[in-house]
Amino acid sequence: MRCFVMFFLLCAWIASLSVRAEVAEPAPRADDQFDVMNWLTHQGLHNIKEESWNAYGQFTYIVSAKSAFSAAYTNLNGSTNSLLPSAERSYTGTATLYLGARLWPGSEAYVVPELIAEEALSDLKGLGSVIQNFELQKSGAKDPRVYLSRAYVRQTFGFGGNRVQLESDPMQLGGAVDSRRLVVTAGNFSILDFFDKNTFSGDLRKQFNNMAFLTYAAYDFAADARGYTIGLVAEYYYDDWAVRAGHILPPADPNQLPLSFKPFTFYGDQVELEHKHSLFGEPGAVRVLGYRNRENIGSFNDAINAYNSNNNLNATTCLGFNYGSNNSTAPDLCWVRKPNIKMGIGLNFEQQVSDDIGLFFRGMYSDGRTEVDSYTSTDRSISLGALMKGTRWGRGRDTIGIGYAQGWLSNAHIAYLSVGGIDGFIGDGKINYFPEIAIDLFYSFNVFTSLWFTADYQHIENPGYNADRGPVDIYAVRGHFEF
């Protein structure tokens, strides 16, 4: 706690210096978040309202500390997916460059190189629906790794209605478009670039740290181990309504980096309906999303049945892709992977209630018959909370937030874990099942225009859905710079 007090005092001192600097030399900016493109516009070198190109970037560093907690057992009988009960520290550092250009009328092209270095708590094992740091990747390492996160082309076809001004942003060129339009995107991207947007729970580099607030925890969207994919997305906007459909590639093996390039054999399909509204004069939105994946994944019941019929089909004998369990008395999903269907449906709601307060809710139900292929070990999930800007205490660019998240497992998933099975993230050797819960509190302090420091506290109950272990407290400090 002492380090957080020192952190806030340091932020206050730096902020006072930055305020004095801004008073002495005011800088022109029309946009509240990104200065470079506005500055170029002010110099007559760019037109931010009708862009032919833009460039943005960000750097985020998060350091976390997990306190020790009590556990009746850890990695029982050679299982390998427990959250370690000892105190631990972890970090992530990411840097991203967003480059966009208009190739011809109505077109946009984007290239987004990215860098990450990380060290996860317990090697990113032991938490299902409430992984404590949204930046963590299954393929990350301590040494910085550079990769191309996105490279895609977008074409917009206008069909009339009102003219809508799109603001300049990363992966969005500023310009006017029809309120009734078709937008088609093809290439390499994250499906979350288009689906399941939420103003108050989505921009986690300035909001919550916990991954449960990035999207539906139970949304097993097709992606590689970094969260990116290749595919096609079509979006049709009709004034306050929008409908989206996407067809994307899953990983060749669950939770791994290479994608399966068999788009008509293995794929992830999703459809989302969105309506934006005004409630008591304040903006809000409702979104309904359904997904259907066809992937090479294992059924929990099939794994149990295979082991019961022949106990040589256990976690230590499979020579194919597996999660490395050393539990010879447990079934394993590697024996039963085949083309399987996985489906889910979710509701996303956001509502601004005043100029400085916003509320959000997400909830999703997935069928829970098969293992996670790309996202978290969750079969049903909810998240809800509130954000408040600091205008009431004279800090209009600060944000404070509180969020609650809870995840559940299906009966088949519980049965598989209870006999010692593990999946991509969880498996203690046995389980005393209870829903996994996280409370996330944060304060994001704006030091100057494009720099934020955030203090974040998380309390996690039943890590790995196991009431025999925990609770866990996690403290974090985040620095985020963007231009």
Image: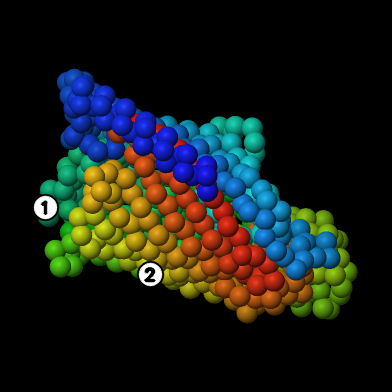
Q: Position of residue 323 (x, y in %)?
A: 73, 56
> Is any part of residue 483 visible from this angle?
yes
In the depicted view, which residue is nearer to us: 283 or 297? 283
Query: Would residue 147 be visible to someone looking at this image?
Result: no
The residue located at (34%, 61%) in the rendering is 386
Position of 320 relative to 409 (above/below): above
Question: Which SS class for mark 2?
Answer: strand
Quadrant of the image occupied by residue 320: bottom right
- Of tags 1 and 2, which is closer to the observer? 2
Quarter of the image where the C terminus is located: top left
- Residue at screen point 23% across, 63% down: 353
Q: Which mark is residue 162?
A: 1
Q: Report the residue marked by disc 2.
A: 347
SS assignment at label 1: loop
CA distance for labels 1 and 2: 28 Å
Answer with left or right where residue 221 lies relative to residue 346.
Answer: right
